[in-house]
Image (spheres, rainbow, N blue to C red):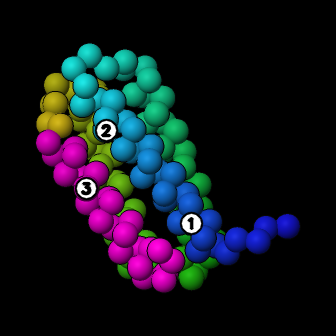
Amino acid sequence: MFTKTPIELLLKDFSNLLNKCQSVCDLVSTRRYNENLAILTTSEGYAIAEKAYIRCDQNTELQTKEVEAFVNAFDDFYFELKQVLFHDDDDITSLKERLSTMQSQYEALTQSFNLL
């Protein structure tokens, strides 16, 4: 039924997650952003992350240090995003740095699986 490997599916999930994170980062970086849209986009991203975590739990070949590094980068981004959304801490510069780290970790991950 499925022709994609677990690695390809995980990279697709992480690519979608990275895109959601980019979208929400761009959204909250604007002066007067729609808070409901930001929360919805964040929620969509978190749902993708949870699906990817389950995929990793079920496939031991996905349990690599590069996958762990990307997950940790997402966790850091997500924590920073919650600070921006729900507290008075509007450190957008730090949020963008976290996103940049996620992007770097995603590139390292695709290289580690030889899929560019």
The residue pinned by badge 3 equals 100
Q: Which residues are magenta?
A: 93-116
Q: Secondary structure at mark 3?
A: helix
Mark 2 touches mark 1? (CB < 8 Å) = no
Answer whether residue 98 is magenta in the image.
Answer: yes
Q: Residue at x 46, y 33 (%)?
A: 41
Mark 2 touches mark 3? (CB < 8 Å) = no
Q: Earlier in the sequence, mark 2 or mark 3?
A: 2
Q: Residue at x 31, y 20 (%)?
A: 33
Place residue 100 in its image quadrant: bottom left
Q: Earlier in the sequence, mark 2 or mark 1?
A: 1
The label on residue 10 is: 1
The residue pinned by badge 2 equals 25
Q: Residue at x 16, y 25 (%)?
A: 88
- Rounded to the nearest whole Å, what is the CA distance between mark 3 and mark 1? 20 Å
Report the front residue among 98 and 76: 98
Q: Earlier in the sequence, mark 3 or mark 1?
A: 1
Place residue 65 in its image quadrant: bottom left
The picture places residue 97, in percent across and down from the top left corner, at: 19, 51
Q: Secondary structure at mark 2?
A: helix
User: Does residue 73 appear in the picture of this structure?
Assistant: no
